[in-house]
Image (cartoon, rainbow, N blue to C red):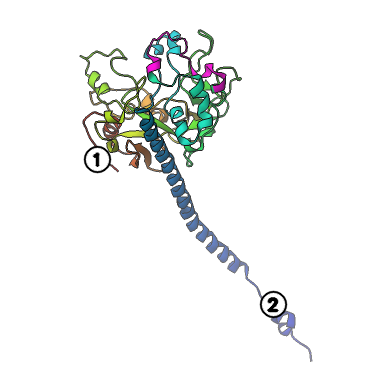
Amino acid sequence: MKRSLSQSPARNNRRGFTLIELLVVIAIIAILVSLLLPAVQQAREAARRTQCKNNLKQLGLATHNFEGTYKKLPPGQIFSVAAYSNFALMDNMTLLGTLPYLLPFMEQDALYKPFGTSMKMDAQDFAVNSVDPMKQNYFNYAAVNAVTGVQVPGFLCPSDNAASALKPGTSDFTLWMIRTAGGPNYGGFVMNDEAPDPYTSRHGLTNYTGCTGRLTATAEELGITMFSPDFRAINDYEGMFRLNKQKKFADIADGLSNTIMFGEVTGAFYDGYLGVGRFRSFSWLVGPMGMHYAAKSLASISYGGTRPTLEDAKFTSRHAGIVQYTMGDGSVRALSTSTDADVLLRLGGAADGQIVSGIE
């Protein structure tokens, strides 16, 4: 008796998926993965945002420890306003901002040592237009220049990649590249694609700077008379870290919890805000950030031009919809990127009398 093909043992024992069943399973898995990935990415960003918040918290604690030790805050930067128009006065500044002063209070004693032993770090030792021969830019000291490229992890936001600017044709924001007076590259930004020399190097970067309030210099230093409508608008909105000054916490009349101490910064991009064409990041040697380009003028003085559109002229962040700030009391607050510009200006002012509260 012959077996039919349908009765073959081999055919009766065969098991498996059809092609359609396999494709359905793959499609279901793909849908599940697509639903899971955003949640994973959100969890990672939440962790990065928390780390960034902790970095800002540590800057606040370091500043409080500095003020407790020296009874004054670090200066914003030692800077001769006259040097804007007269490069011969460039030696009237150290080109050091706030962060180098905080290194000993962030377990970075070895990194700070060349600064502390080579340079005068007190603002009163750097009177504007002084003829003190010891007053020098940081890069005039070999020991100091040797450490300016060291990267401090606590100065970087994990959601950003500030080092993406360190490529040929870009610049870090160390403010000025000073060489021989009158030389071909005298003044300007430090360009990272230039050959090494005794004065410039790749600098360690930061995503955080101090807040200087409105403008960085006083109206008097800028030559603005008391009859100008902008006179009080500049001086009344001085921030915590000022050029050539070392304030005290007692000077923060608006209250420490109502005054911005540090904020996040990103840099500048060729293709718009937070694009891929980054061409500038901030060096941790840099001075503080002003609030005037982000804010409308309370004295009806307009700061026009393209500068207000650049991210390197205001506090910005890689966190979606917010910028995180350290307040004077050491707390960290996340403010919406849509926060009114004048509100930010008031928060940046240390003693303007216009206290802002309940801002989210």
Q: Which residue is mark 1?
A: 357
Q: Position of residue 299 (x, y in %)?
A: 23, 23
Q: What kind of residue is marked 1?
A: Ser
Q: Position of residue 36 (x, y in %)?
A: 49, 57
Residue 218 visible here: yes
Query: Who's the residue at 71% across and 83% down the image?
Result: 6
Q: Nearer the viewer, residue 225 or 129?
A: 129
Label 2–label 1 contact, CB within 8 A? no
Whether residue 220 is in magenta: the answer is no
Could you say which quadrant of the image residue 99 lies in? top left
Q: Nearer the viewer, residue 179 or 28?
A: 179
Instruction: State the residue lying farthest toward the bottom.
Output: 1
Q: Which residues are magenta?
A: 124-143
Per the rendering, the mark at residue 106 is none
Q: Secondary structure at mark 1?
A: loop
Q: Nearer the viewer, residue 249 or 280?
A: 249
* Left or right: 66 as drawn, with respect to 189: left
Q: Which residue is mark 2?
A: 14
Q: CA distance from mark 2 to mark 1?
A: 73 Å
| Residue count near mark 1 (Cα–Cα under 10 Å), binned few <14, some 14–19, many ≥20 | few
Q: Quadrant of the N terminus?
A: bottom right
Please give the count of numbered marks on the rendered protein: 2
Q: Position of residue 62 (x, y in %)?
A: 41, 35
Q: Secondary structure at mark 2?
A: loop
Is 44 placed above or below 295 here? below
| Residue count near mark 2 (Cα–Cα under 10 Å), binned few <14, some 14–19, many ≥20 | few
* Left or right: 355 as drawn, with respect to 176: left
* Left or right: 168 as drawn, with respect to 208: right
Query: Who's the residue at 45% across and 14% down the image?
Result: 135
Q: Nearer the viewer, mark 2 or mark 1?
A: 1
Q: What kind of residue is marked 2?
A: Arg
